Image (spheres, grey):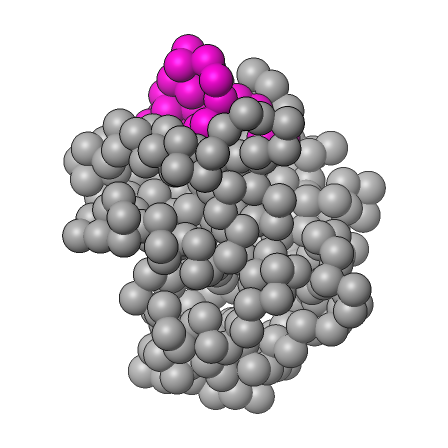
Amino acid sequence: MNLAFASNAFKRNTLEEAVELIAGVGYRGVELMADVPHALPGLMGEGRKRELRKRLGDLGMTVSNVNAFTLFACGDTYHPTWIEESAGERGRRVEHTKRAVELAAEFGCGTVSLQPGGPMIGMALSREEAGGRFAEGIGACVETARRCGVILAIEPEPGLFIQTAGEYIEWKRENFAAEDRVRMNCDIGHLFCVGDDLPAVIREHHGEIAHVHLEDIGRNRVHQHLTPGRGVIDFAAVFAALREVRYTGKMTVELYPYETTAGGVAKLAWDHLTPILAAGGKVGGELSAI
């Protein structure tokens, strides 16, 4: 399994430039940002997609994940969310997700990572109501996901409707217990921030993990993505748990705050993580950094 890097750190570059720079570090996977300025589905014409697929092939790169979390093209980091008061705004989120799923399929990618509902601060909305709106929106995307063979990977995040792995599991059991196209994007840093035991989450819920995001977090557990090695996350323990459960999905380093130093932090992350992966060996040839 190749270690990938997310294009959203390279927002000051074109997507094509980002792919070249990420490949130059040594990564053989790239996560596409399904938003401006990179791969907003509505702006990805057939010619550009064809040329990007060729470029990826020439570089020996694959698409690890399509990140449909943000929608800066229409709002901000979170809005429109799945739980807006406006049905029209919720519909924009649904349509964006469907287009991102189709884009993933065109690049042979099996997952699209999604925000877990949205922030509830300032909303006169109960958790039951928020969960219902979120389920309605995800439900509207399931058929597209089935048709395209892509997983809707919900990403718990501090401060949003679903923050912990346990909250994700509870919401899924209530709404999509038998739906294998709805699973979790396991963002290691996010779960660390909210106090989840990372190896325990991986071991107990590995069947729900469709994709993994990697970043470091400081000892204070504040949600600030740090370059691996600059925080306190025990990546050796995380990789050991993934090997133990024979995880065969993708792992993407996500360092979006570092727009001015994206190439440098991509290299620092590579240099920190690949020796840890190599030291742990492989399980069935699946878990490897190179």
Vertically, is 163 above or below 277? above
Name which residue lies at 55% across and 73% down.
Answer: 197
Horizontal side, residue 184 vs residue 5: left or right? left
Vertically, is 94 above or below 173? above
87 magenta-colored: yes
Viewport quadrant of the N terminus: bottom left
Vertically, is 146 above or below 35? below
**Nearest the eye: 272 or 190:** 190
222 magenta-colored: no
Horizontal side, residue 13 vs residue 219: left or right? left
In the rendered image, which quarter is residue 18 located in?
Answer: top right
Name which residue lies at 22% across and 52% down.
Answer: 177
Q: Which residues are magenta?
A: 77-100
In the rendered image, which quarter is residue 99 located in?
Answer: top left
**Nearest the eye: 84 or 122:** 122
Name which residue lies at 27% across and 53% down.
Answer: 173
